[in-house]
């Protein structure tokens, strides 16, 4: 789009002011290492089938991969890792598989939380917890309480989580504030809504990885990942390791994150030649 004075720059609307945007800016995203890596862990069942094993073995191997990736991320200085462990749609899976996943989750909480705590890693959970057993809800609360003061890295586990649910819940909270008279409709904008979604007090995901060869978000962090760099890998999750993580990080380091600016503007702001 051009005008008599040359190309038009910035957001433009024919009927008025530019739309407000919740896009980050480059000044908070300097450096080659992502602050926050989010991962859709896909491929456990296919990994097991390829080896003639039951699906439960794939999930068990996937849990081992989780530990390896958390360790590698902490060693590399990543601040936040968010893992998509169980989506709101996963309840549609066979009952035996869901029951095994819940059992594995409980065992992992019991056996791994102390290791995370010893390594100064904070553990958080996002998603609708009311669908889980009282025992599992208590285990999550206890793990969060134990690790709350840790500062080396934060690991977020998304369980019974969906991005659409997350946004709808944020909108419901804002509607309740309007109803109570604490806000007006004119107070609601992208920034305020973003303050009510999960992970609002953490940096947004810089890099979103999906394993298993699929190339979709599957209802994961739809709001938070608006400006994430996406990296899709054919590697099935149980085979994802520190070396594969390094491939993703190297690819990320070679990208230019513009957040709506031109490439030349970004280079100028970052002092690049």
Image (cartoon, grey):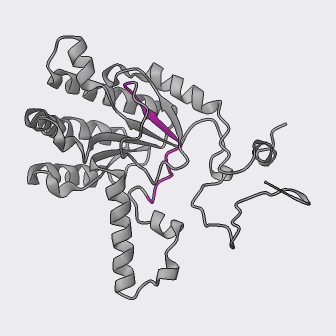
Q: Position of residue 49 (x, y in %)?
A: 21, 16
Residue shown at 33% from the left, 64% from the top = 169
Q: Is 23 placed above or below 159 here?
A: below
Q: Is residue 215 left or right of residue 34?
A: left
Residue shown at 35% from the left, 40% from the top = 83
* Between 184 and 31, the one nearer to me in the picture: 184
Predominant secondary structure, magenta span: loop
Residue 255 picture quarter: top right
Q: Is residue 144 inside the magenta stretch?
A: no
Q: Is 89 placed above or below 138 here?
A: above
Residue 215 picture quarter: top left
Q: Position of residue 249 (x, y in %)?
A: 54, 29
Q: Magenta part of the protein: which range? A: 200-212
* Between 200 and 16, the one nearer to me in the picture: 16
Outermost residue to the top: 51
Outermost residue to the bottom: 181
Which corner quadrant holds the N terminus? bottom right
Which corner quadrant holds the C terminus? top right
Q: How many marks?
A: 0
Q: Position of residue 109 (x, y in %)?
A: 20, 40
Q: Is residue 204 inside the magenta stretch?
A: yes
Q: Is residue 73 left or right of residue 168?
A: right
Q: Position of residue 43 (x, y in %)?
A: 30, 25
* Between 8 and 49, the one nearer to me in the picture: 8
Q: Is residue 12 left or right of residue 117?
A: right
Residue shown at 39% from the left, 20% from the top = 235
């Amino acid at each position: 789009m051009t005008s008599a004075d040359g190309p038009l720059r910035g957001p433009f609307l024919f009927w008025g002011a530019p739309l407000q945007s919740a896009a980050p800016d480059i000044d908070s995203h300097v450096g080659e290492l992502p602050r926050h890596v989010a991962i859709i862990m896909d491929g456990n069942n296919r990994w097991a089938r390829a080896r003639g094993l039951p699906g439960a073995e794939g999930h068990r191997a996937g849990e081992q991969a989780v530990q390896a990736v958390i360790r590698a991320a902490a060693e590399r200085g990543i601040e936040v890792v968010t893992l998509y462990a169980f989506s709101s749609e996963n309840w549609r899976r066979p009952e035996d598989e869901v029951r095994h996943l819940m059992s594995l989750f409980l065992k992992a909480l019991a056996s791994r939380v102390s290791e995370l705590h010893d390594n100064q890693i904070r553990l958080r959970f996002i998603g609708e917890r009311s669908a889980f057993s009282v025992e599992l809800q208590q285990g999550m609360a206890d793990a969060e309480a134990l690790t709350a003061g840790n500062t080396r890295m934060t690991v977020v586990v998304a369980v019974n989580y969906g991005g659409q649910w997350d946004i709808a819940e944020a909108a419901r909270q804002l509607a309740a504030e309007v109803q109570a008279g604490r806000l007006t409709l004119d107070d609601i904008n992208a920034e305020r809504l973003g303050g009510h979604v999960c992970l609002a007090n953490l940096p947004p995901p810089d890099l979103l990885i999906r394993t298993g060869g699929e190339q979709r978000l599957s209802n994961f962090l739809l709001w938070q990942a608006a400006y994430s760099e996406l990296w899709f890998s054919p590697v099935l999750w149980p085979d994802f390791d520190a070396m594969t993580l390094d491939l993703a990080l190297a690819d990320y380091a070679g990208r230019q994150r513009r957040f709506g600016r031109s490439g030349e503007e970004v280079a100028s702001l970052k002092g690049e030649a």
